[in-house]
Image (tube, grey):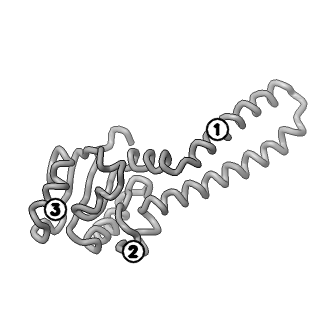
């Protein structure tokens, strides 16, 4: 993912952004590569459940719970093993896992990592800046849909964030 270009997709309306993401979602297998920025009340339900930061966070927390269940099962199994080397290795792995889970509890850090690792960020021409992390980002490309409907200042906000404009 680090070699993937960063793409900002904007439009003047929420509906247009959501329509783009519906089509794009069919081409990108990993929903974590797409983030929809904006107030959830303005985002279609289908898009909100797949691409908002809250939806991604919920998915990751679910996966973390699965990992925690695995750790508990493995812990029970390790209690029956007498090889001290194996037990020591497991304790080290468990400590690393617990540290990882504790770091993910920090919501701001998690959101930052999700946004930074996404390939596509989508929102309205000005609304995408409602996220603090994105304010400092630059993009390889900005794709502006319905550009004729947007005002010049709305367009400029998006244009200055990217190297190339589509």
Are dots 2 and 3 in contact, CB under 8 Å?
Answer: no
Label tally: 3
Pointer 1 local density, CA inside 10 Å: few below 14, some 14–19, many at least 20: few
> At 16% across and 49% down in the image, what residue appears?
160
> At 26% across and 64% down in the image, what residue appears?
124
Q: Tell me which numbered mark, 2 or 1, is placed earlier along the sequence.
A: 2
> At 25% across and 46% down in the image, what residue appears?
139
Q: Which residue lies under the disc numbered 1?
A: 99
Pointer 3 local density, CA inside 10 Å: few below 14, some 14–19, many at least 20: some
Q: Tell me which numbered mark, 1 or 3, is placed earlier along the sequence.
A: 1
Q: Tell me which numbered mark, 2 or 3, is placed earlier along the sequence.
A: 2
Q: Is residue 160 above or below residue 24?
A: above
Callout 1: helix, strand or loop?
helix
Are dots 2 and 1 in contact, CB under 8 Å?
Answer: no
Q: Is residue 53 above or below residue 82?
A: below
* The C terminus sits in image quarter: bottom left
Q: Nearer the viewer, residue 114 or 130?
A: 130
Q: Nearer the viewer, residue 155 or 82?
A: 155
Which mark identifies residue 154?
Answer: 3
Indicate left or right for 92 with 30 as reference.
Answer: right
> At 11% across and 66% down in the image, what residue appears?
151
Q: CA distance from mark 1 to mark 3?
A: 43 Å
Residue 26 in the image, given as x and y percentages of width and height = 37, 64
Which mark identifies residue 109?
Answer: none
Callout 3: helix, strand or loop?
helix
* The N terminus sits in image quarter: top left
Q: CA distance from mark 2 to mark 3?
A: 21 Å
Indicate left or right for 48 with 61 as reference.
Answer: left
Q: Is residue 85 above or below residue 99?
A: above
Residue 62 in the image, given as x and y percentages of width and height = 61, 58
Q: Which residue lies under the disc numbered 2?
A: 41
Indicate left or right for 146 with 137 as reference.
Answer: left
């Amino acid at each position: 993912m680090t070699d993937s270009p960063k793409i900002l997709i904007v439009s003047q309306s929420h509906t247009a952004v959501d329509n783009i993401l519906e089509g794009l979602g069919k081409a990108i297998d990993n929903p974590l590569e797409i983030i929809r920025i904006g107030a959830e009340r303005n985002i279609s339900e289908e898009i909100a459940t797949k691409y908002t930061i809250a939806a991604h966070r919920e998915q990751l927390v679910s996966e973390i719970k699965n990992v925690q269940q695995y750790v508990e099962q493995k812990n029970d199994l390790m209690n029956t093993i007498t090889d001290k080397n194996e037990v020591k290795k497991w304790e080290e792995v468990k400590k690393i896992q617990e540290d990882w889970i504790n770091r993910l509890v920090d919501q701001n850090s998690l959101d930052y990592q999700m946004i930074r690792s996404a390939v596509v960020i989508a929102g309205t021409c000005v609304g995408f800046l409602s996220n603090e992390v994105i304010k400092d980002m630059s993009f390889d490309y900005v794709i502006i849909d319905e550009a004729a409907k947007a005002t010049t200042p709305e367009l400029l906000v998006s244009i200055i964030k990217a190297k190339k404009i589509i």
